Each structure stands twice: as C-alpha cells, then as structure tokens.
Amino acid sequence: MPIKQVMTDQRVPVKIWTDDVDDKSKQQLTNIASLPFIHHHVAAMPDVHLGMGATIGSVIATHKAIIPAAVGVDIGCGMVACRLSITGNDIEEKSLKKVFDQISRDVPVGRAQHKDDRALVDAAKPFENRLDVMTQKHPQLLKAFGKFSKWINQMGTLGGGNHFIEVCLDESNQVWIMLHSGSRGIGNALADYFIQLARADMERWMIHLPDRDLAYFPEGTEHFDDYVEAVTWAQEYAFQNRQSMVDLVLAGLRRHLPSFEVTSEVVNCHHNYVAQEHHYGANVWVTRKGAIRAREGDLGIIPGSMGARSYIVRGLGNPESFTSSAHGAGRRMSRTAAEKQFSESDLAKQTEGVICRKDKGVVDEIPGAYKDIDAVMENQKDLTETLHTLKQVVCVKG
C-alpha cells in the first residue's frame, strides 16, 4: 500500500504509512519536521508509536546534525535470525521444553550478566581499546557506567522488556532461531550520557526546542565526533552481542535436537541506529528509530509479538521511506495499560501452543498490547516483500 497520510504543516512534510497513529505520536512527528536540519521529509512506518522525543517507527534524515535521543537509548538494538537444516517433524515437544530450559540457563536475561568464569572474553575484547579511548576523553563515563562497568560480562546477554529468543517454524516447517537484543546496559549508559550532553549544549547555546529530547549535536561542534564514535562502538557491540547469543543458542539446541547445520540464510540487522547515506541528492545522516534498512535486496526481520507471526523480508528500495521499513508490530498500549487490562489467563490464551513464560512478570508483553503484525505488513507492501513467514514454538523473554 502507498503512503496513507501526509502532514504538511511544518518545514518539511511527514509521510505516514498507516492510518493507525495517535495524536501524541503525530505531535512528535510534527516537532521533528519543524527542525531546521531535517532533510526532505520525515517518514513514519506502519508500526509508528510514541517514543522518547522521536516516535518509534520513524526515519529521520538530517543535514550535518544527529539527535541522540532519536537514535534511542538501546543503541544498535535489532534482530538476528538463521534457518536450520532440520524441520518441525524432526523435533518432539519434550525436546522443545528442554530447549527452553537450556536457553534460559545459557543466556542471561533481564539485568543478569555472565559470571566471570563464563564471560565471552574473546568476543568482547576487540571492543576494549576504543572504549578506553572514550573514557579517557570523557572520564565521567566511568561513573555513568556504574554497575555496567563489567561490560565484558554483558556480551552474549539478552536484556529485558521486549527482547526475546525464539525457536520458530516457517511456512515449509523449517526450523529457525530468531532473537531480539541490543547494546545492553553499556549502550544505554553511553546513550544517556550523550543525550545529557546534547541537552546541556542546547541550554548553553540558548536553542529552544519543541521537546528537550530533540537536543542535537551539529557537525563541527565539541561533542559531535565523540558521539559518532560512541554510537558506532555501541552499534558494533550490539551486532556482536546478537551473534554471540546465536552461538550460545545453537550450542544449546545441539544438546537436545537432532544433528543440524545452519543454512546460508542468516540475517543480522539493526533497527535503532544512525548511518551516513545518500538520499534525494545529498549525503545525510539517517536515523532509524524502530525501523530497518530496506534497500533493494536487503534482507530484514519484522517480528510480531510472542504468539504472533514474524516475517523474513527483502527490501524493495522505496526512496520515499529512505529505503526503510517497519521493525515489528509496534505497541498499541503502554506496559502499564497492558498490565491493567490483561491477566495471566489472557496471556496463556494468547500464547497457546508456545512454550514460554506465562506469569504476571511478562503480561506487559502480551500480544494484545501490540498492533496487528499482519496489518503492518499489508501497509508496507511497497517497502518489502515477504520471503518467509515464521511462527514461534519456543519464546524466552527477560
């Protein structure tokens, strides 16, 4: 489907790929479009919903400036998926329950991290020197890191909230593993530190913004290059974090499932990040806050909520979305609202057939709290094509 709405009441238009967008999200989009360095237009994906400063599900191209809060506090958050050589016919349900327990033991979730004797040092060590350089230039970061100073122990850990690890079956009954995670506590600390610096810069320069979370770093100013280094570091750390978890999950699966190989179909993509790209005749910074890159031929992952379908897609390279697409179903209600509206019984019904937690600690992640993933996919037929449709049989959450 083409663009559903265009808002034209600011400096640049806002192009929206859905009719399902609330007034607060529209106001955030309007605020972004009013900034003097926004390039050409703002794109809002079909899963767009309220975020911090910038809407989740937005794509923001900027001339010579970056908005740290638009990139987000989970820098480099994204997805990885890989297809295995076995099928659902090769797996017994009792084996899947063992897989659930094994993954839960091997991959720390929530705020947990690996103990020193199990830390993935080889995967984390390549990041050490660059982080040391950052902390030497910004010694306040050491205090900001706090309990996350043992960032090496966070490598290969899931986190909480909407992060997950799943075993899925596709339309051909082929087995996949899929997971969602980012740069963990260390990425969050870096993000928060630079967001605070950007706010302080705005106050120092007496720049008035429609939202303080739209504070930005212009190119050539004191903190711009340092932020680019920090965000690049965190994005690369997030990418490796996901790959490290894949390795742990595959090792766990091999203990309980028939012998298998990983096929050539492996996808690892960010959906909270910033990158330099060329669009509409200019080299710009593109911030995707809850959106994936979908250039022609790019492979991507668009997950539904636990209990719903997920999709492996190929980008169509639509220039109007800055070659981007949705990153998932998108929330339709807050966590607090979900906890008030739904019960553990509701969660059990909506996740029937999935081996997962069904306790009150994850009620806020109930499928009913999210938009309809199939409606999201219908609204972006001009952005991606579907290669595989996945349905989870195991879901591990933080």
Image: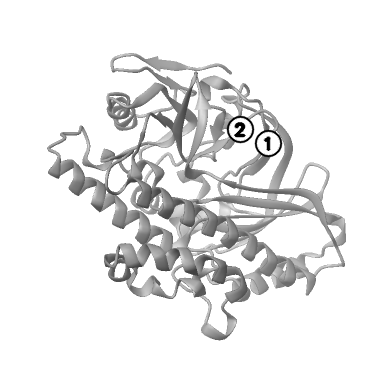
- Give left or right: position of 336 versus 287: left
Per the image, the residue denoted by label 2 is 294
Q: Can you tell which mark lies on residue 279?
A: none
Where is residue 218, by image quadrant? Answer: top left
Residue 33 seen in the current view: yes
Q: Which residue is mark 1?
A: 313
**Quadrant including the N terminus:** top right
Pointers 1 and 2 in contact (C-beta within 8 Å): yes
The amino acid at mark 2 is Ala
Q: Are there few (<14), some (14-19), or many (20+) residues within 10 Å of tag 1?
A: many
**Is the residue 346 above or below the residue 45 in the image?**
below
Q: Position of residue 57 (x, y in %)?
A: 45, 35
Q: Secondary structure at mark 2?
A: loop
Between residues 194 and 75, which one lies in front from this camera angle?
A: 194
Q: Nearer the viewer, residue 349 or 142?
A: 142
Can you give x and y, in whole percent of width and height, for residue 71 in the image? Answer: 40, 44
